[in-house]
Image (spheres, rainbow, N blue to C red):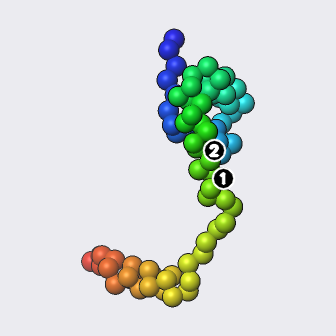
Amino acid sequence: MKQEFTQLQLTRLVYGETTKAESDMLLELALTVPQIAETLETLKKGKEALGRDRFSPSDMVINSILGYSASSAPVSAS
């Protein structure tokens, strides 16, 4: 049976969202297929570049979004 792996599966691996069996299989594949290893390395570097910083919008931005939502929400006829 031929297995196909997607970038999504590699992304899940990088973020620790795979099972032990999936992780083992993907890591073994990365050792034998240079393209997979390169993609995995790129994803790891991307994750590191993002870091752990979390950003929160200002109160003004939140209020603007809520205001827009209230003004553009469809009105239902009940």
The residue carrying mark 1 is 48
Which of the 4 image quarters holds residue 66? bottom left
Give 9 or 53, whichever is nearer the viewer.
53
Q: Which quarter of the rendering shows the C terminus?
A: bottom left
The structure residue drawn at horizontal position 56% and vertical position 25%, both measured from the top left corner, is 34
The structure residue drawn at horizontal position 72% and vertical position 30%, both measured from the top left corner, is 20
Alpha-carbon span between mark 2 and mark 1 = 6 Å
Give 36 or 19, whichever is nearer the viewer.
36
Q: Are marks 2 and 1 in contact (CB under 8 Å)?
A: yes
- Relative height, residue 60 to residue 18 (above, below): below
Tell me the kind of residue under disc 2. Lys
- Disc 1: CA contacts within 10 A as few (<14), some (14-19) or many (>=20): few
Residue 72, percent from left and from top: 32, 79
- Relative height, residue 54 to residue 12 (above, below): below
Residue 41 horizontal side relative to residue 69, left or right: right
Residue 75, percent from left and from top: 30, 79
Q: How many marks?
A: 2
Seen from this angle, which residue lies furthest left?
77
Residue 33, percent from left and from top: 57, 22
Seen from this angle, which residue lies furthest right?
20
Name the secondary structure under disc 1.
Answer: helix
Residue 7 in view in this figure: yes
Numbered mark located on residue 44 in the image: 2
- Relative height, residue 38 to residue 73 (above, below): above
The structure residue drawn at horizontal position 67% and vertical position 28%, both measured from the top left corner, is 27
Name the secondary structure under disc 2.
Answer: helix
Give 17 or 38, whichever is nearer the viewer.
38
Residue 35, percent from left and from top: 53, 28
